Image (cartoon, rainbow, N blue to C red):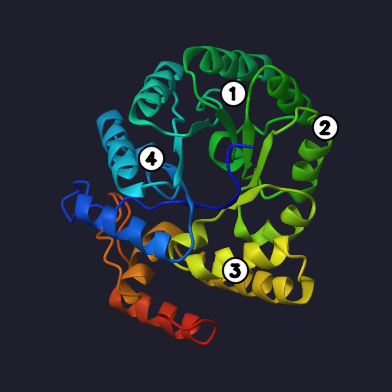
Amino acid sequence: MILEGVVTPILTPFTEDGAISEDRLEGLIDFLKRNGIQNLFVCGTFGSGPVMTIEERKKVTELSMEYSGDMKIIVNVSSTSPEVSIELAKHAREAGADAIASTPPFYYNYDAEAVHRFYVKLLSSVDLPVFIYNIPSRVGFNIPPNLLARLAEEGVAGIKESSGDLVRFYHYMSIVEKRDFTFLIGTEALLVPAVLAGADGCVSGLSNVFPELVTELYRLAKARDLKKAFEKQFLAIELRETLFTSDPISTSYALLKLRGIDVGYPKSPFKMPSGAELEDLKRRLVAKIRFK
């Protein structure tokens, strides 16, 4: 097992003119550390990896390694180009990352054999644990359970399962026979049922804004304190639903600012919520959780 617990797919702070904001990234990582986060997923969906240049992604990886201390780091190397994924994977290895993750290459309608060839090539190109990042809503391909089992035997170390399909996640867990394979559920909305079934951790976008809630949720699930765990699980789902009524990434920047953590701006073409939108969000959220 590469890691366990809550993994934050960390936001990437930008300045208003679109440059990476190094001091704000350091401040966000410090905030997450102070609230119990021990693992980061860098340049993922919440981290705006797909809209960054290759050089920007490399810089964020390097800065995250510099600021993270003993936190575990998974670097997302997903790309439409397998060659770019391999380049980013090799850079992550040089930077000292603990693992990499990649979706299948996307845009074209690749079949399962093409996806298999991609992961075999990625595995042979870098001496790092490789995670499959299954997010069919973004890439148009849903990893079949038999393909996951096959790739696990060929060296894949784990999966970040972000389809939102708990039955598929259970199928993955039942079919993979490789020991020490790492199963990460890709949403806090399914954290409790996933952990109860034996998942190693959760990649939680919500943990950018409310890390203390999600780490407590994970602790309760691991302790099998089911009454309290499901109370927190339902709260997390309510917060998600509030957050996802508009763009969750831009909203996360704004809510962190309300919590006193300045993470700057999202990368264009995202934009910050308007004052009226933010006040409405604050009104709906303040009844559910106290800002600290």
Q: Amino acid at mark 2?
A: Ile
Q: Residue furthest front?
A: 70
Image quarter of residue 65: top left
What amino acid type should be assigned to the residue bearing mark 4? Gly
Q: Residues within 10 Å of mark 2 (few under 14, many from 20)?
A: some
Q: Amino acid at mark 3?
A: Glu
Amino acid type, mark 1: Asn
Tell me the CA gap for discs 4 and 1.
22 Å
**79 and 28: which is toward the camera:** 28
Label 1, on which residue? 109
Label 2 or label 4, whichever comes before in sequence order: 4
Above or below: residue 103 compared with residue 167: above
Give the residue displayed 71% in from the left and 60% down from the top: 222
Locate the N terminus and report the quarter of the image it occupies.
Answer: top right
Which residue is the site of mark 3?
A: 216
What secondary structure is found at the residue carrying circle 1? loop
Answer with left or right where residue 286 lies relative to residue 179. Answer: left
Q: What quarter of the picture does the C terminus occupy? A: bottom left
Residue 49 numbered mark, or none? 4
Q: Is residue 221 left or right of residue 49?
A: right
Q: Which residue position is annotated with label 2?
A: 175
Q: CA distance from mark 4 to mark 3?
A: 28 Å
Q: Residues within 10 Å of mark 1 (few under 14, many from 20)?
A: few
